[in-house]
Image: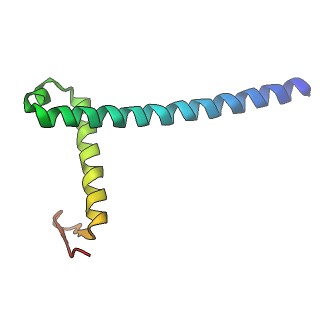
């Protein structure tokens, strides 16, 4: 019984550590993409050197940033046309 408790505790700890590692990896990826985006703003030619995965991830990052900006400025996205409309607060 004691060995089972120890094993369960270890498995729980391992799961928690794995989850924390995954979270940190995602945060690191976002930081990496923000750095890449900054570098591209200085030198557009760098875009040609990026992998397809990097480009997809950058697109997602830019989409997320645009969504945040729209929320801050009270812009509502029209689902039918894909265009933004709304009033500034």
Residue 1 percent location from the top left of the image: 91, 28
**Residue at position x 49%, y 36% from top?**
23
Residue positioned 27% across, 33% down in the render: 35
Give the image location of residue 9, x and y in percent.
77, 31
Where residue 3 sits: x, y (%)?
A: 87, 23
In what quadrant of the picture does the C terminus appear? bottom left
Number of dots carrying numbers: 0
Residue 25: x and y in percent read 45, 31
Task: Name the residue: 30% across, 64% down.
Answer: 72
Residue nearer the viewer, 49 or 53: 49
Q: How is the image coloured?
A: rainbow
Q: Left of 29 or right of it: where is 12?
A: right
Which residue is situated farthest in the front direction here? 42
Q: Toward the viewer: 89 or 1? A: 89
Q: Is residue 14 left or right of residue 87?
A: right
Farthest-out residue, right: 1
* Residue at the limit of the structure toward the left, as seen here: 45
Residue at x 66% of width, y 28% of height: 14
Q: Quadrant of residue 6?
A: top right
Q: Is residue 45 above or below residue 58?
A: above
């Amino acid at each position: 019984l004691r060995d089972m408790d120890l094993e369960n505790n270890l498995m729980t700890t391992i799961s928690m550590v794995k989850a924390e590692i995954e979270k940190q990896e995602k945060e690191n990826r976002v930081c990496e993409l923000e750095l890449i985006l900054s570098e591209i703003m200085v030198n557009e030619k760098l875009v040609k050197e990026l992998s397809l995965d990097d480009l997809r991830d950058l697109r997602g990052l830019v989409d997320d940033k645009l969504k945040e900006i729209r929320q801050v400025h009270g812009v509502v996205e029209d689902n039918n046309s894909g265009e933004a409309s709304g009033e500034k607060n």
